[in-house]
């Protein structure tokens, strides 16, 4: 792409580094900013730079926070005897949006995958074990909510081994056929798993 | 099951070509280098989503083009399925079935099976165990879908575990719990995979022996057996006891990734002691047994691709094969030959719907459509 100005070229270059944004879209955004008030651009630039400078991660669960502790950890009405272990921040948002969960979290910051250079040391695993192992820990159950992939499974397996010595219940989120989906369209691995791990009907009604 | 037609765009030396096939025999004729094998390879793509000769998809794009596309319609008992395989430069290939894009290519494997017989088949005997595992895996994958998924999972775990062993070495630290997170699922998969392979070879071996007797004219006893350390009762203990060695070697030293097929003639290794002719008969019998096994499991005949075999086999073996063709042992057949006259003579004895295509410089045209039904 040829640009009439080095400034535009540079801006397009920077914006197109964002995920899901190609050069064309980046150019459209740049031209949009140029057409609008200077204040719009300044406010955007300012919010991005403040975001990077001021954002913090919760010292306890590594969720995003405005201070040393996130709003979830700071909330006395949440059930802090429950913690849900997730891979990354979007998972916290997804689970929060279900409106079904009132416990705390622990954000690992990724998943174990030696091929991608990610081992336990690169993740918040030690801090999870420390949270559970603390003598005054009120944690009773750790829920593993990791992706149903091979890497998710090995990470879950590793965490189970690491948490085994402590007196906590370890559970994993259920996997199965999507609600509202038709059985015949479920993939065979999911369907097979749902049948193997079928639940008792009477107990739940 | 047969392939009704195929359309090629920028696939190897084919720029743009559309062909309608016979459900019986299709002869692909033409001089060396004209594109006969490439046409078979395009059919292989539609069946297995990959080339039989070049594992790098990008290299099948015609030089100076930025994509290739192969489309075809399979007919199975009257029901037609459109399959499309395409690849752009710098992108991953896309496979569609009736316009729907596959998210997992492995879902396609086995729907429209092919068996390919080529002059390179003796590599199966001459090369390392990886080739024989591939032979075995590609057949089982076509008849057992969950097998392929297990195999892919195992391969991924193995890669992760090997990288982990390298990391242990560089960091000079061993994490028993971490390696156990790979060992346990791998051990479970290994036992499933080796059981399936063993079961397969038990079914395969007698069919193979029967075909060898027909194809070859010697009386030597041939055998194929499954070799795996995983089968042993103590495997789990040995595998776990091997950690120290794994760390030293920085790779996983035991497992189904070391399995092999033991191929013998008169109780001796066919690779070391078989003559060239015996080796040729051996691999053809393997391929014919592959054909039969896929047919047994699928309840229909796979497509047979015969590349250059008239050129490389002696008269005795050709006669036997043509007898099988005449007796309608096979379904749809594609056969390539650089010498049109020879094919004409050989196929004179066969009464089928035979179509002949002449290939020249990456373009095939129908030259003869001889319908002679019995
Ligand atoms: N990506 C590609 N783009 C263009 N041409 C290609 C490509 N890959 C292979 N070819 C050409 O295809 C030709 C080989 O075709 P093929 O192997 O099908 O020949 P053949 O008819 O089977 O010959 P033979 O009788 O010798 O076996 C070669 O000329 C080769 O250069
Ligand atoms: Mg050829
Ligand atoms: Zn927190």
Image: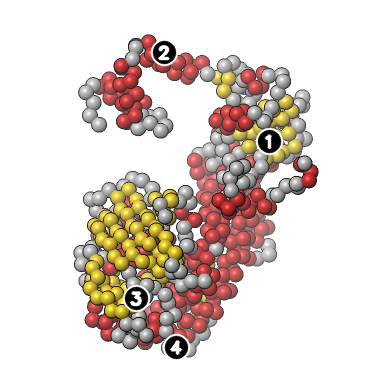
Residue under disc 3 on the same chain as residue under disc 2: no
Q: Which residue is mark 2?
A: A43
Q: Which chain does the numbered disc 4 sit on?
A: B
**What distance separates the C-alpha of mark 3 from that of mark 1?**
61 Å
Quarter in which the N terminus of chain B is drawn: bottom left
Q: Earlier in the sequence, mark 1 or mark 2?
A: 2
Q: Nearer the viewer, mark 1 or mark 2?
A: 2
Residue that label 1 marks? A143
- Using the numbered discs, state the Cα–Cα distance from disc 4 to disc 2 in whole angstroms: 87 Å
**Closer to us: A62 or B257:** A62
**CB at disc 1 and ligand 3 closer than 8 Å:** no
Residue that label 3 marks: B25
Q: Nearer the viewer, mark 3 or mark 1?
A: 3
Instruction: From this view, report whether residue B187 is shown above or below residue B131.
Output: above
How many neighbours does mark 3 have within 10 angstroms: few (below 14), some (14-19), or many (20 or more)? Answer: many
Image quarter for ligand 1 = bottom left
Q: Where does label 4 land, which residue?
A: B218
Q: Are marks 3 and 1 on the same chain?
A: no
Q: Position of residue B343 (x, y in %)?
A: 28, 80
In the figure, is residue B164 to the left or right of B216? Answer: right
The label number, if any, that marks residue B96 in the structure image: none
Is residue A61 visible to the viewer in this orientation of the structure?
yes
What residue do we see at 49% from left, 56% from top? Answer: B107
Residue drawn at (42%, 32%) of the image: A19
**Image depth: mark 3 or mark 4 in front:** 3
């Amino acid at each position: 792409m040829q640009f009439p100005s080095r400034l535009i070229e540079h801006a397009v270059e920077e914006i197109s580094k964002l995920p899901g944004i190609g050069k064309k879209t980046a150019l459209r955004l740049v031209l949009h900013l140029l057409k609008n008030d200077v204040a719009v651009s300044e406010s955007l630039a300012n919010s991005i730079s403040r975001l990077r400078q001021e954002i913090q991660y919760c010292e306890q669960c590594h969720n995003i926070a405005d201070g040393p502790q996130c709003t979830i950890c700071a909330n006395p009405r949440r059930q802090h005897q429950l913690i849900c272990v997730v891979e990354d921040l979007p998972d916290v948002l997804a689970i929060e949006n279900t409106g079904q969960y009132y416990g705390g979290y622990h954000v690992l910051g990724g998943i174990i995958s030696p091929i991608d250079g990610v081992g336990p040391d690169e993740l918040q695993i030690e801090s999870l074990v420390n949270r559970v192992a603390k003598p005054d820990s009120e944690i009773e159950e750790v829920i593993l909510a990791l992706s149903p992939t091979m890497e998710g499974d090995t990470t879950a397996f590793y965490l189970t081994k690491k948490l085994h010595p402590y007196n906590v219940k370890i559970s994993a989120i259920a996997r199965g056929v999507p609600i509202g989906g038709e059985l015949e369209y479920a993939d065979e691995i999911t369907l097979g798993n749902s049948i193997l791990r079928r639940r008792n009907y009477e107990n739940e009604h | 099951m047969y392939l009704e037609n195929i359309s090629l765009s920028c696939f190897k030396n084919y720029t743009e070509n559309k062909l309608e096939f016979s459900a019986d025999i299709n002869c692909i004729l033409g001089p060396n280098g004209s594109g006969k094998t490439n046409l078979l390879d395009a059919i292989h793509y539609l069946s297995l989503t990959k080339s039989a000769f070049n594992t790098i998809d990008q290299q099948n794009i015609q030089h100076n083009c930025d994509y290739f596309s192969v489309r075809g319609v399979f007919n199975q008992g009257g029901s037609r399925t459109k399959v499309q395989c395409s690849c752009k430069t710098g992108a991953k290939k896309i496979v569609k079935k009736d316009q729907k894009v596959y998210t997992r290519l492995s879902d396609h494997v086995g729907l429209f099976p092919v068996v390919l017989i080529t002059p390179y088949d003796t590599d199966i005997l001459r090369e390392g165990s990886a080739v024989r595992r591939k032979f075995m895996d590609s057949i089982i994958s076509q008849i057992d879908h969950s097998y392929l998924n297990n195999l892919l999972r195992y391969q991924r775990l193995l890669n992760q575990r090997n990288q982990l062993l390298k990391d242990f070495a560089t960091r000079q630290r061993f994490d028993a719990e971490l390696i156990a997170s790979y060992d346990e699922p791998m051990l479970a998969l290994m036992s499933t995979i080796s059981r399936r392979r063993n079961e397969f070879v038990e079914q395969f071996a007698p069919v193979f022996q029967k075909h060898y007797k027909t194809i070859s004219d010697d009386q030597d006893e041939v055998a194929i057996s499954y070799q795996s350390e995983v089968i042993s009762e103590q495997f789990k203990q040995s595998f776990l006891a091997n950690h120290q060695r794994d760390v030293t070697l920085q790779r996983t030293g035991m497992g189904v990734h070391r399995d092999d097929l033991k191929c013998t003639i008169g109780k001796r290794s066919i690779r070391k002691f078989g003559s060239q002719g015996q080796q040729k008969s051996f691999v053809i019998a393997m391929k014919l047994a592959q054909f039969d096994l896929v047919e047994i499991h699928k309840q229909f005949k796979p497509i047979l691709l015969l590349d250059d075999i008239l050129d490389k086999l002696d008269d005795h073996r050709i006669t036997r094969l043509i007898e099988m063709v005449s007796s309608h042992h096979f379904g749809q057949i594609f056969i390539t030959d650089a010498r049109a006259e020879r094919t004409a003579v050989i196929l004179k004895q066969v009464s089928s719907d035979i179509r002949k295509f002449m290939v020249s410089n990456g373009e095939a045209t129908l030259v003869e459509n001889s319908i002679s039904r019995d």
